[in-house]
Image (spheres, rainbow, N blue to C red):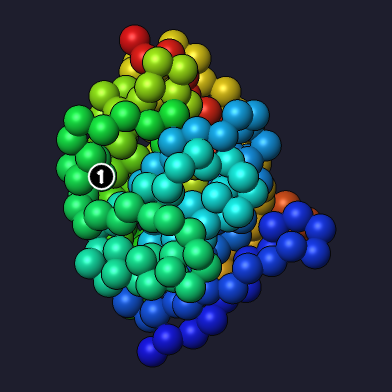
Amino acid sequence: MTKKYTCKLTGNQTFEFKLKDSVFHPTGTSDEIIKAVSANIDTPGKILDLGCGSGVVGFALYLLDKSKGPLYCSDLSVDATELIKENARDLGIPVVARQGSVFSPWEGQFFDYIVDDISGIAQNVAAISPWFRKTSCESGLDGSDLVIEAINSAPNHLSDVGKFFFPILSLSNVEKILDAAHKRFKHIRHVGHKQWKLPDELIDHMDLLMDLKAKGWINFEEKYGWLLWSTDVYIAQDPK
């Protein structure tokens, strides 16, 4: 099934593109990534949207004049890479889209800005969430596997002054992911934070959530009478 999605940029600027049920849909985290990344790119450069899904993050950055040359995108899903090519044609955006896991499609390629848009929540949480009903999430029991793989491999694909942007969701093992980032990069900077209400689909499984929280695999807090989780965005620079 094909739907339309409208993304708001700045002021009254918006753009519209197609979605498919088999491709991960944009979420509030997508908006936070766009906001944080665009605010921290001063000079347009070669951009890779890693784990692009429908392409919302990469498209937004291109339309905000942050990309120099074509937009580069990849995703494990064949449907995603085909959809992003179709959407790019409709939007008039030059794109190089490839299918594959993490950096496997980009051997020998270097980028000024890499945006990690790969799924990163604990698998058991993904299974009961509203976000992965028709798409897969194989990010490990604590949600750290794919994010850490991207962190460890990113230096092999960054230009000399390149920046690696990555979100960490509190529905994953935040401490473990940050520790991996500090081992691989000299400088890590926090550039975005947003809290969200836990969806009802997750609240219905509080025993599971409390067990995962006790293990340190996820975190959430009670505030204003709500249960809240968070998205945080970081920049990593200067690989060790």
Q: Position of residue 128 (x, y in %)?
A: 39, 71
Instruction: Give the residue drawn at x 45%, y 77%.
Output: 19
The residue most toward the bottom is 1
Drawn side of residue 149 relative to residue 12, left or right:
left
For label 1, the SS is loop
Residue placed most toward the observer, 78 or 143: 78
* Residue 172 appears in the figure: no
Quadrant assignment for the N terminus: bottom left
Q: Position of residue 170 (x, y in %)?
A: 50, 45
Instruction: Give the residue drawn at x 26%, y 24%.
Output: 156
Q: Position of residue 213 (x, y in %)?
A: 44, 47
* Residue 105 appears in the figure: yes
Residue placed most toward the observer, 176 or 102: 102
Compared to 212, does 200 lie above or below?
below
Q: Count of labels shown?
A: 1
Q: Amino acid at mark 1?
A: Val
**Residue 53 placement: quadrant:** bottom left
Instruction: Give the residue drawn at x 20%, y 53%.
Output: 100
Instruction: Give the residue drawn at x 39%, y 55%.
Output: 95
Compared to 196, does 186 lie above or below?
above
Drawn side of residue 221 relative to residue 56, left or right:
right
Q: Which residue is mark 1?
A: 102
